[in-house]
Image: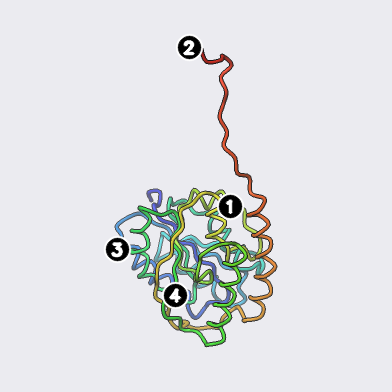
């Protein structure tokens, strides 16, 4: 197979009810682009049949790459493993639960002519009022402290230029701050509305409170990184002085 132009990275944990439909739908959409691609699904130590289903799908989808974390390590670790395996020059990310709509991918990829990172913003969220409200508050606090303008960091529909992804060192929980970390690397970042659907099955892995308190701790770490980031211009000086006059 030729080297892929696009790499789709999907973390998955206990998604046996969704994962087959997710892979099929992503591949159907990516096929329309007429470009070589790969779909990398990282099984994050699932305790159900997620891994077995993925392995069986490899026979039908040669472009499918299945990674397996030996124990449940979290969304950031599963995403990072996918990033490190990705060979494409452009990387797309989706959740495995089918709430992200792969049909948004062609439009987001067109925007990469002018941007290095395109972040989806869930226009009509199919979540409870409490989840939407807590997300809005958390995004406001993040933007206030980091001087950012990312309005929906929780949306997993994102597209990255791979060269920026490979420069970023991720830590647990830092997947929520990928646009900010990419901007520190010099990436041009923008947002665009995307579709949001009801969960395809299974249960959410995040509650309101566990997401909120962990994010606050990570937030101050990112703000520290911003304040201590190395910013300088350098030039090499020739050993012969310039002639005067």
| SS class, disc 2 | loop
Q: Please, which residue is most extreme toward the front here?
A: 245
Would you name the residue on which mark 4 appears?
122
Q: Nearer the viewer, mark 4 or mark 2?
A: 2
Would you name the residue on which mark 2 appears?
245
Q: Contact (CB < 8 A) between labels 4 and 1?
A: no
126 shown above or below 70: below
Mark 4 or mark 2: which comes first in sequence? 4
Mark 4 or mark 3: which comes first in sequence? 3
Mark 1 or mark 3: which comes first in sequence? 3
Mark 4 or mark 1: which comes first in sequence? 4
* Of residues 66 and 219, the one drawn nearer to the viewer in this rendering: 219
Residue 50 in the image: x percent, y percent? 54, 74
Q: Nearer the viewer, mark 4 or mark 1?
A: 4
Residue 78 in the image: x percent, y percent? 58, 64
Q: Nearer the viewer, mark 1 or mark 3?
A: 1
In the rendered image, which quarter is residue 122 located in? bottom left
| Alpha carbon distance from label 3 to label 2 | 64 Å
241 vs 228, left or right, is left
| Alpha carbon distance from label 2 to label 1 | 48 Å
What label sits on residue 32 in the rendered view?
3
| SS class, disc 3 | loop
189 shown above or below 14: above
| Alpha carbon distance from label 1 to label 3 | 30 Å
Mark 2 or mark 1: which comes first in sequence? 1
Would you name the residue on which mark 1 appears?
168
Q: Nearer the viewer, mark 3 or mark 2?
A: 2
| Alpha carbon distance from label 4 to label 3 | 23 Å
* Of residues 182 and 29, the one drawn nearer to the viewer in this rendering: 182
| Alpha carbon distance from label 4 to label 2 | 63 Å
Q: Contact (CB < 8 A) between labels 1 and 3?
A: no
């Amino acid at each position: 197979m030729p080297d892929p132009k696009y790499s789709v990275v999907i973390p998955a944990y206990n998604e046996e009810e969704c994962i087959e439909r997710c892979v099929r739908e992503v591949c159907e959409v990516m096929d329309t682009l007429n470009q070589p691609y790969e779909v990398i699904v990282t099984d994050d130590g699932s305790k159900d049949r997620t891994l077995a289903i993925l392995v069986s799908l490899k026979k039908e989808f040669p472009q499918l790459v299945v990674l397996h974390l030996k124990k449940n390590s979290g969304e950031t670790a599963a995403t990072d493993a996918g990033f490190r395996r990705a060979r494409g020059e452009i990387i797309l990310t989706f959740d495995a639960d089918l709430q992200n709509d792969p049909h948004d991918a062609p439009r987001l990829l067109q925007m990469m002519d002018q941007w290095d990172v395109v972040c989806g913003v869930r226009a009509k969220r199919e979540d409870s009022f409490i989840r939407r409200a807590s997300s809005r508050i958390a995004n406001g606090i993040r933007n206030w402290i980091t001087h950012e303008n990312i309005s929906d960091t929780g949306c997993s529909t994102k597209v990255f230029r791979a060269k920026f992804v490979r420069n970023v060192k991720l830590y647990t929980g830092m997947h929520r701050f990928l646009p900010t970390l990419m901007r520190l690397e010099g990436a041009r970042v923008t947002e665009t509305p995307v579709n949001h659907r009801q969960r395809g099955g299974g249960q959410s892995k995040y509650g309101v409170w566990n997401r909120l308190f962990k994010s606050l701790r990570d937030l101050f770490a990112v703000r520290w990184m911003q304040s201590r980031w190395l910013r300088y211009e350098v030039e090499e000086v020739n050993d012969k002085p310039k002639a005067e006059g």
